[in-house]
Image: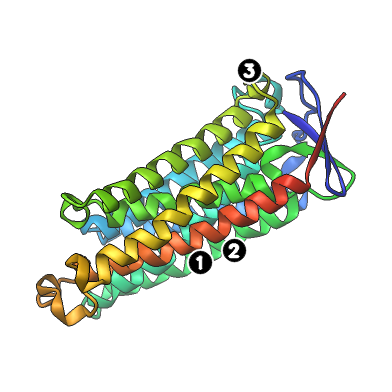
């Protein structure tokens, strides 16, 4: 959905047409050069790791997937820009590049932290470790490059842009990313099974993730006019519902995980799963703590989303 941002006003149109924002000369522009840096950085990162097979285990696999995925999608974007194929692209070109750049920045950030802390530091000194350290460096460069693209292309007053370039749109990306991390930490059912309050928390994470994901998909597909209610009403209602749901989770999850009255573990030393450490695993108590922190982070994100969404004014033209 094309939008015009004027201070806190967003003007929307019901047509699916969009202005071509790229050309064969795109590679010579600052944004094109920045995307070339993204392409080269991710390519070098996964090439260094692949040359010495330094991606064993789930953490290494995640880092390798991140670099390969970001390289492939960035290459597609460059080809579309170079060929001027934006109108033939199946997704909204006003929303797709910045949505992807935001996800890529978060993906590369996570790999730049997880890969060295859970994998590289346990490698013996030598060629493999040197390649892994160099790959981490290029991952950090890619993260900065993607974050710079987001900063350059986000919505500003007076610009015609897509919803995903606005602060609420970028917050939707952040919220779904944090939810995915939460899902990774609660992948062990023993953390919440047989406790209805904790199962409710898991349901909250899933419901809010799906709703935010639907919002992103609707904007990428220019399908917001298919909603049975006005899009602004949908956004405000979604943000308010998510805040209320996460408000219950921020209370129930720590209460039932760390309070001894509810068979929780107030201290890490009481959790027997933390007695045995493995470089590629996270014990249950650490998982519980991480989910509690991430729940608070996402609640703050949804509160900010609600504040910004209520300040936006949508006017059809």
Colour setting: rainbow
- Which residue is the site of mark 3? 226
Earlier residue among tags 2 and 3: 2
Q: Position of residue 85 (x, y in %)?
A: 68, 25
Please tell me which residue is depicted at 30% across the width and 53% down the height of the picture: 184
Q: Is residue 258 above or below residue 183?
A: below
Residue displayed at 9% across by 73% down: 272
Q: Is label 1 in a helix, a strand or a loop?
A: helix
Residue at point 16% right, 50% down?
A: 194
- Nearest to the eye among marks 2 and 3: give it: 3
| Inter-mark Cα distance, 1 to 3 | 40 Å
Q: Mark 1 vs mark 3: give the one in front.
A: 3
For label 1, the residue is 140
> CB atoms at circles 2 and 3 under 8 Å apart?
no
Q: Which residue is mark 2?
A: 144
Q: Quadrant of the C terminus?
A: top right
Query: In the picture shown, does residue 242 fall above or below 91?
Result: below
Q: Nearer the viewer, residue 68 or 275?
A: 275
Mark 2 secondary-structure assignment: helix
Q: In the structure shown, which secondary structural element does the residue marked by tag 3 occupy?
A: helix
Q: Can the viewer see residue 204 in this picture?
A: yes
């Amino acid at each position: 959905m094309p939008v015009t941002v004027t201070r806190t006003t967003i003007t929307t149109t019901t047509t699916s047409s969009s202005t071509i924002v790229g050309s064969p000369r795109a590679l010579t522009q600052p944004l094109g050069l920045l995307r070339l840096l993204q392409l080269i950085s991710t390519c070098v990162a996964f090439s260094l790791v692949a040359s010495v097979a330094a991606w064993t285990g789930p953490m290494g696999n995640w880092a390798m997937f991140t670099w390969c995925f970001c390289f492939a999608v960035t290459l597609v974007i460059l080809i579309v820009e170079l060929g001027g194929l934006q109108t033939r692209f199946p997704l909204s070109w006003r929303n797709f590049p910045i949505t992807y750049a935001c996800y890529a920045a978060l993906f590369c950030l996570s790999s730049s932290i997880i890969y060295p802390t859970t994998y590289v530091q346990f490698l013996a000194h030598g060629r493999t470790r040197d390649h892994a350290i160099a790959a981490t460096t290029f991952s950090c460069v890619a993260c900065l490059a993607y974050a710079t693209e987001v900063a350059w292309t986000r919505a500003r007053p007076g610009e015609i842009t897509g919803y995903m370039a606005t602060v609420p749109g970028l917050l939707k990306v952040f919220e779904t990313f944090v939810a995915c991390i939460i899902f990774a930490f609660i992948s062990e059912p023993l953390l919440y099974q047989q406790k209805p309050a904790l199962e409710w928390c898991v349901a909250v994470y899933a419901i809010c993730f799906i709703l935010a994901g639907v919002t992103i998909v609707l904007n990428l597909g220019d399908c917001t006019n298919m909603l049975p209610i006005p899009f602004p009403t949908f956004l405000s209602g979604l943000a308010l519902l998510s805040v209320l749901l996460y408000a219950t989770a921020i209370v129930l999850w720590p209460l039932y995980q760390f309070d001894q009255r509810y068979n929780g573990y107030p201290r890490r030393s009481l959790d027997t799963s933390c007695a045995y450490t493995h470089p590629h695993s996270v014990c249950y108590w650490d998982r519980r703590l991480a989910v509690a922190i991430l729940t608070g982070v996402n609640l703050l994100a949804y509160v900010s989303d609600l504040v910004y969404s209520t300040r936006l004014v949508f006017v059809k033209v």
